[in-house]
């Protein structure tokens, strides 16, 4: 898969793991706010928020990856992404920085306890490896 030019990514943290989202998939990053729960929704869907008049579903990556939910902190953020012509919010523990990768390798079958289909690759930075998230897989199931 080698290097994909100099695409930019936003590095986010969930637990102790670092993940990256393509910067052009991100609509905006906002502070955590109250989420209105929706009865009978999928377990990883936390609910919805009203973002300047638009209703945006909120997804927990912690739940999606089989991690226990943690109390929200001052660092908790909602990364609002564009997915299938809609906006979806993803709850992350922290947003780190914008990165470009010197090298991107194909993902393994499994990354820890998470299925490899959630990742488009593993990027290399000066600080180590970062898993690049595949939004289609994470948000469509």
Image (cartoon, rainbow, N blue to C red):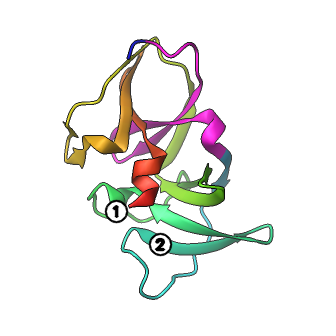
From the viewer's side, name the closer residue of 7 and 84: 84
Q: Looking at the image, can residue 130 be seen?
A: no
**Figure quadrant of residue 128:** top left
Do labels 2 and 1 touch, CB within 8 Å? yes
Q: Residue at x 47, y 47 (%)?
A: 135
What's the mark number on residue 46? 2
From the viewer's side, name the closer residue of 122 and 92: 122
Residue 47, position as x, y percentages in the image: 52, 75
Q: Secondary structure at mark 2?
A: strand
Residue 18, position as x, y percentages in the image: 39, 36
Q: Magenta stretch?
A: 3-26
Residue bearing the label numbered 1: 63
Q: Secondary structure at mark 1?
A: helix
Q: Is the C terminus in the top left, top right, bottom left or bottom right quadrant?
A: bottom left
Q: Residue at x 56, y 13 (%)?
A: 5
From the viewer's side, name the closer residue of 117 and 102: 117
């Amino acid at each position: 898969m080698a290097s994909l030019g100099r695409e930019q990514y936003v590095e986010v943290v969930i637990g102790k793991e670092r993940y990256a989202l393509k910067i052009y998939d991100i609509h905006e990053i906002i502070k955590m706010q109250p989420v209105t729960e929706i009865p009978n929704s999928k377990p990883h869907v936390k609910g919805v928020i009203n973002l300047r008049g638009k209703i945006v579903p909120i997804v927990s990556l912690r739940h999606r990856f089989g991690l226990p939910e943690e109390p929200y902190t001052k660092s908790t953020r909602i990364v609002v992404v564009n997915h299938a012509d809609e906006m979806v919010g993803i709850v992350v523990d922290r947003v780190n920085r914008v990165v470009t990768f010197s090298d991107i390798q194909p993902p393994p079958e499994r990354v820890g306890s998470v299925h490899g289909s959630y990742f488009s690759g593993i990027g290399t930075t000066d600080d180590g490896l970062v898993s690049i998230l595949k939004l289609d897989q994470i948000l469509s199931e």
